[in-house]
Image (cartoon, coloured by chain):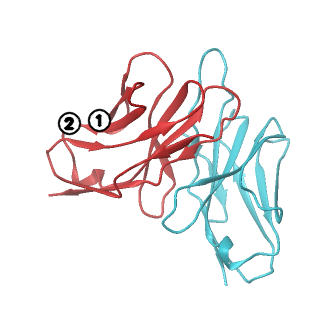
Chain colours: A red, B cyan
Amino acid sequence: AQSVAQPEDQVNVAEGNPLTVKCTYSVSGNPYLFWYVQYPNRGLQFLLKYITGDNLVKGSYGFEAEFNKSQTSFHLKKPSALVSDSALYFCAVRDGMGRRALTFGSGTRLQVQP
Amino acid sequence: AAGVIQSPRHLIKEKRETATLKCYPIPRHDTVYWYQQGPGQDPQFLISFYEKMQSDKGSIPDRFSAQQFSDYHSELNMSSLELGDSALYFCASSPMDGGGMAYEQYFGPGTRLTVT
């Protein structure tokens, strides 16, 4: 069975500082990894994905994520946080074959202080 | 750009009633997924359809059923509602993987179901 762990319930960062939201995963075979963001009372918005290739993936709104196979991690990063980045962030995984449903982590609330 | 449409956005039902949630995928997306997100929880996969056939099944209760129609829209039917069914129900759509591509799922705004 596949699983995702987001070890931090909340991450606090000052505006303009770099941010990291952590994610580790467990899956059979090659992983397909995703990050989604959820604003209050809204659906999940796709940020970026890793399927294959370059370990550093760039996505929407200046976010990027680094795939590390040996550490089974896929941390979300942004060089300079904005107050408007404050939201709930979900990491998700599916295996590379067969089932296409996403398994989500528990979510990390990002709070960016002005 | 067109997005996933869900209706209704809010629904209040009493215990033991039935509810039907509708989902209209992004045009040319042939796969639909349903997820349930309880308060303070991560989304949990319920069921998916590809080309009108059930393609995968997750933690969907036997009281729930779903189908995908010829126009690719999908409906989630929920019967004998329980208080614990109160949640945000998301529909997502994507194209089928192919040609070396694995596609992300695009989520609708959700239907908030409250069972009293």
Crowding around mark 2 (Cα neighbors within 10 Å: few <14, some 14 to 19, many 20+) is few
Tags 2 and 1 both on a single chain: yes
What separation in Å lies between label 2 and label 1 (alpha carbons)?
A: 8 Å
> Horizontal placement of B29 versus A32: left or right?
right
Dividing the picture into quadrants, the one containing residue A3 is top right
Name the residue located 52 percent from the left edge and 69 percent from the top edge.
B39
- At label 2, the amino acid type is Pro
Q: Earlier in the sequence, mark 2 or mark 1?
A: 1
Disc 2, SS: loop
Pick the quarter of the image with the C terminus of chain B: bottom right
Disc 1, SS: helix
Q: Is residue A44 above or below residue B81?
A: above
| Residue sitting nearer the eye, A88 or A97 | A97
Which residue was labeled with disc 1? A62
> Horizontal placement of A73 versus B100: left or right?
left
From the top left corner, tell me how far across and down residue B48 is, in percent: 74, 44
Name the residue located 85 percent from the left edge and 41 percent from the top edge.
B70
Q: Is residue B3 above or below residue A40?
A: above
From the top left corner, tell me how far across and down residue B21 is, in percent: 73, 62
Q: Is residue A20 above or below residue B64?
A: above
Which residue was labeled with disc 2? A79
Name the residue located 48 percent from the left edge and 49 percent from the top edge.
A105
From the top left corner, tell me how far across and down residue B61 is, in percent: 77, 62
Question: Marks 2 and 1: CB-CB under 8 Å?
Answer: yes
**Of labels 2 and 1, the one closer to you:** 2
Residue B100 seen in the figure? yes
| Residue sitting nearer the eye, A15 or A8 | A8
From the top left corner, tell me how far across and down residue B95 is, in percent: 66, 31
Name the residue located 58 percent from the left edge and 29 percent from the top edge.
B103
